[in-house]
Amino acid sequence: MNPHPIDSLDTLRQRVREFAEARAWQRYHTPKNLVMALSVEAAELAEPFQWLTPEQSQTLSAEQHEAVRQEIADVLIYLTRLADLLDIDLLEAAADKLALNARKYPVEKSHGNALKYSDFSHD
Amino acid sequence: MNPHPIDSLDTLRQRVREFAEARAWQRYHTPKNLVMALSVEAAELAEPFQWLTPEQSQTLSAEQHEAVRQEIADVLIYLTRLADLLDIDLLEAAADKLALNARKYPVEKSHGNALKYSDFSHD
Amino acid sequence: MNPHPIDSLDTLRQRVREFAEARAWQRYHTPKNLVMALSVEAAELAEPFQWLTPEQSQTLSAEQHEAVRQEIADVLIYLTRLADLLDIDLLEAAADKLALNARKYPVEKSHGNALKYSDFSHD
Amino acid sequence: MNPHPIDSLDTLRQRVREFAEARAWQRYHTPKNLVMALSVEAAELAEPFQWLTPEQSQTLSAEQHEAVRQEIADVLIYLTRLADLLDIDLLEAAADKLALNARKYPVEKSHGNALKYSDFSHD
């Protein structure tokens, strides 16, 4: 069991900040560098899935699952750090985006269809 | 003000799940497809920064900031959806990864140096 | 028919260089910025495939095919520009890497198995 | 010196195809999987640059340069394989895209400014 559990995104934000400051990494943590690092982590998360069928991607081995769990954590850590530097509230941003998406992808037009809204203009 | 505020990652997870289910998007939401979508969103987040200097990336215009905020939200939304499907607790995963990173990047060796731990073997 | 056909990677390299210089874009074209731009283009190439099944990805519509063709071109253009700045011969680099891969993935061990070489150590 | 030099993209395309067929990897090489693999390689190419300043990215060590050269080769190899499967001529696609870009970024409007064409509409 982790001796330093984290119970909220606010706590995570604080812990990631302390981690960076203890190592004097602030000068590396420009928004530009962090979006690059986040992209790299997202690719590392995608890598184990690249040759899998969609079905295989749903039945990971315990070892694969743990590797994916660590990459997911890396993405969240960099995302939290970036949002901290840009003074963005992650949950508020997500709530606003979901509201926007609900208008972009109305249920009646999007049912069973993951295409982009713009594609509906062909209807 | 958002009429549907979100106060925790658990609530976000539930809301994203409902969003997908209302549109019958479950069949698109395999882990393989979601890691692809997450990578694409991470790149859309990186795109506005690609020609900026590190300094410029720290002083975004209000318009740029809002665009970046929406892309950050997209990354979080897909990350939450992926973690939900894989039954991964995001905060627990992040706490475990921070503990691992603290061992990989000891303060005394990492101070002012963002290089990878493996690079320290050259010391 | 394109009035300015390109018959080799050398010609492409020269044309891309002239394109950048005519617009005084050299100061944007640091290796760091170009690898970011290349990643973004790679994601734009991936985007139309994210919700497709593997089978669907093999039967693109004419419109999809043309969009993909343009994104492939963007990746090649940035790759050529980056290699030019780093004084790397693309075909020589590819020939060397194929030779390396042939040793990493020997036919007898890799037949029908796209897993990484390192994974064979479990055998 | 490489005993199997490659003198054109056509030869590279043929060599990459033979490499895949000798290992019976065709079933892995759907366009969807290849765009994922290409994105992952593009991120591996970006990774060594993520914490560098733009200036540092212009003065790689010999070791860094060789690592980057190999990642560039990987991107070209997957790009060539993808174009082969989709029956796309890489040089023709690049020539057509450069012609399109020349119209999108006219010299007089783009001089010293790498912003997207769409941004010029604010003028």
Image (cartoon, coloured by chain):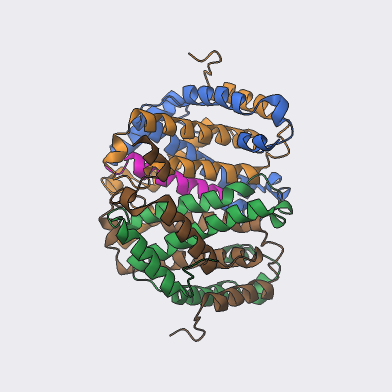
Chain colours: A green, B brown, C blue, D orange
Please say whether residue C7 is visible from this viewpoint.
no
Rendering coords of residue B86 (x, y %): 65, 63
Rendering coords of residue B87 (x, y %): 64, 66
Placement of the C terminus of chain C among the 4 image quadrants: top right
Is residue C35 covered in magenta? yes
Instruction: Name the residue rendered at 66%, 44% in the picture.
Output: A51
Q: Quadrant of residue D58?
A: top left
Above or below: residue A60 compared with residue A93: above
Above or below: residue A102 compared with residue B88: below
Q: Quadrant of residue C18?
A: top left
Q: Which residue is more in the foreground, D66 or D8? A: D66
The chief SS type of the magenta part is: helix
> In this image, C65 relative to B48: left or right?
right
Q: Which residue is more in the foreground, D46 or C106? A: C106
> In this image, A27 relative to C111: left or right?
left
Q: Report the number of numbered marks.
A: 0
Highlighted magenta segment, given as a residue range: C26-46
Rendering coords of residue B85 (x, y %): 66, 65
Please say whether residue B100 is visible from this viewpoint.
yes
Instruction: Name the residue rendered at 40%, 55% in the picture.
Output: A35
> In this image, B41 relative to C33: left or right?
right
Above or below: residue B116 compared with residue C19: below
Q: Quadrant of residue D46?
A: top left
Rendering coords of residue B44 (x, y %): 46, 57
Instruction: Name the residue rendered at 42%, 34% in the picture.
Output: D68
